[in-house]
Amino acid sequence: MKQNAIIKASAQDYLQLIQVWEASVRATHHFLKEDDILSYKELILNEYFDQVDLYYIEENNIISGFLGLAGDTIQMLFIHPDQRGKGIGKRFIDFAIAEKGTDKVDVNEQNEQAVGFYKHLGFSVSERFAEDAAGKPYPILAMELQ
């Protein structure tokens, strides 16, 4: 299988990225309420995307997944549910570590698949926050590469 390039995103890509985000969240974040999903969607589209460096991988002109970095921390990593299990997440992590010097990630504690994924790649929990960045009661784990 040919490796698709990791592409730097721009504001023109936001609508496609938010569609990937929503599909991914609906497939993995079963702990979120519908109101929360809609409120986060607005925040991400209108604020959070502008606060991170975004990268994506596409196949046949459709975005498979994306990565959002702020400094040395992975703030976002979302893979379309149809594209999971193909190594896209690991490619993004390898890119973030090797090319961008990333060694930290913030992840929802209740997203057990993601926590397991990062642990498998050598990250471990360094800190726990009772609320997320929006002040909602969804605990966040700060993880660091060991």
Image: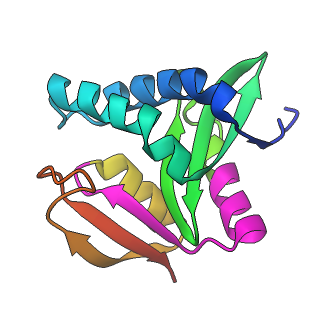
Quarter where residue 45 is shown: top left
Picture quadrant where residue 46 is located: top left
> As rendered, which of 106 and 49 lies closer to the eye?
49
Instruction: Pinpoint residue 81: horizontal percent, then vertical percent.
Output: 48, 26
Q: Is residue 23 above or below residue 11?
A: above
**Magenta stretch containing residue 103, yes or no?**
yes
Q: Which residue lies at the image location 70% right of the left edge and 36% below the top edge?
A: 10
Q: Residue at x 66, y 51 (%)?
A: 92
**23 relative to 66, above or below:** above
Vertical order, 128 against 109 (above or below): below
Give x and y (percent) for residue 108.
Answer: 29, 53
Magenta part of the chain: 91-110
Residue 48 colored magenta?
no
Location of residue 98 in the rendering, given as x and y in whole percent from the top left corner: 75, 69
* Residue 77 position (above or below residue 31): below
Regarding residue 81, the answer to whether it shows in the image is no
Q: How is the image coloured?
A: rainbow
Tell me which residue sits at (17%, 54%) in the image: 135
Relative placement, left or right, of 2 versus 69 is right
Q: Residue furthest right?
A: 2
Residue 37 position in % (x across, y down)? 26, 29
Q: In the picture, which quadrant includes the N terminus?
A: top right
